[in-house]
Amino acid sequence: MTEDEVRQQAFAMPIDNPAYPPGPYLFVDREYLVVTYRTDPEALRRVVPAPLEVTEPLVKYEFIRMPDSTGFGDYTESGQVIPVRLRGEDGGYVRMMFLDDHPPTAGGRELWGFPKKLGKPELKVHRDTLVGVLRYSDIPVAIGTMGYKYSRMDERKAIASLEAPSFLLKIMPHVDGTPRVCELVRYAMKCVQFKGAWSGPGALQLFAHALAPVADLPVREVVSAVHLKADLLLPYGEVVYDYLQR
């Protein structure tokens, strides 16, 4: 393999058999349980990086099923998204995510900067209840529940929430351990086919864990719970702030 061939073929590692294919990435029947809750404002300020601004002391805790996704396969994800604002644009800061599949873990971290770690999340219907559970080292760290399909949610609001921009803090180290990449990345999903959205009574419990510290943003009050389902397209992101450019 020549130097030019390396440059032409380089996309992801390993170079001759990458862990994931090039995008964009289509998610068929992507399904969410999102429990929005009120938390401690000081706790939020400790974890949200400038220049992002916290707008309200709210957190969206998400459980996401992805049974059919381009190059990533069938997997489940769970984590926290914090409503923020950047230069007048509202969006969500993705604080941490846990999932049970290697390709989207590697691809999410390397391409966009998703803060992904391996865990054991699940989302399922148990009789009349939509149930989301996240386990880390076999210990439950988050349990979310919602009454199953209690009432229809406005379609326009649901699609707007699915297509709202999100922000990621992408960090990649140099070989000497210093930051090689330290950027704020913006991305937005595209709704290809909307398949339904519902609201209903919800509850959320978070449990302390040294390596999955979702409980550092404690639940003070559950504000809402929604159940969303759609086919979504995930494009590449864009850099909106470079911390290494001074």
Image (cartoon, grey):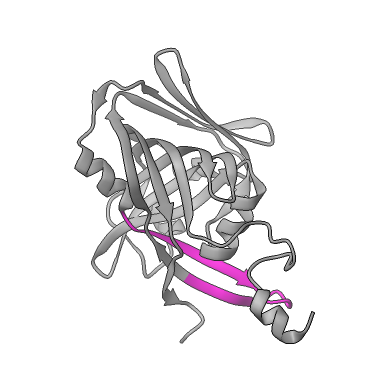
Q: Which residues are magenta?
A: 164-183
Residue under the point 41% across and 18% down: 129
Can residue 97 be found in the magenta stretch?
no
Residue under the point 42% across and 30% down: 204
Q: Is residue 53 left or right of residue 172?
A: left
Q: Pick the residue in front: 28 or 51.
A: 28
Q: Pick the residue in front: 168 or 16.
A: 16
Residue under the point 71% across and 79% down: 6
Residue 178: % across, % down: 66, 77
Is 131 above or below relative to 25? above
Residue 187: % across, % down: 40, 61
Main secondary structure found in the magenta portion? strand
Q: Is residue 15 left or right of residue 48?
A: right
Q: Is residue 8 visible?
A: yes
Residue 132: % across, % down: 48, 29
**How many numbered markers are drawn?**
0
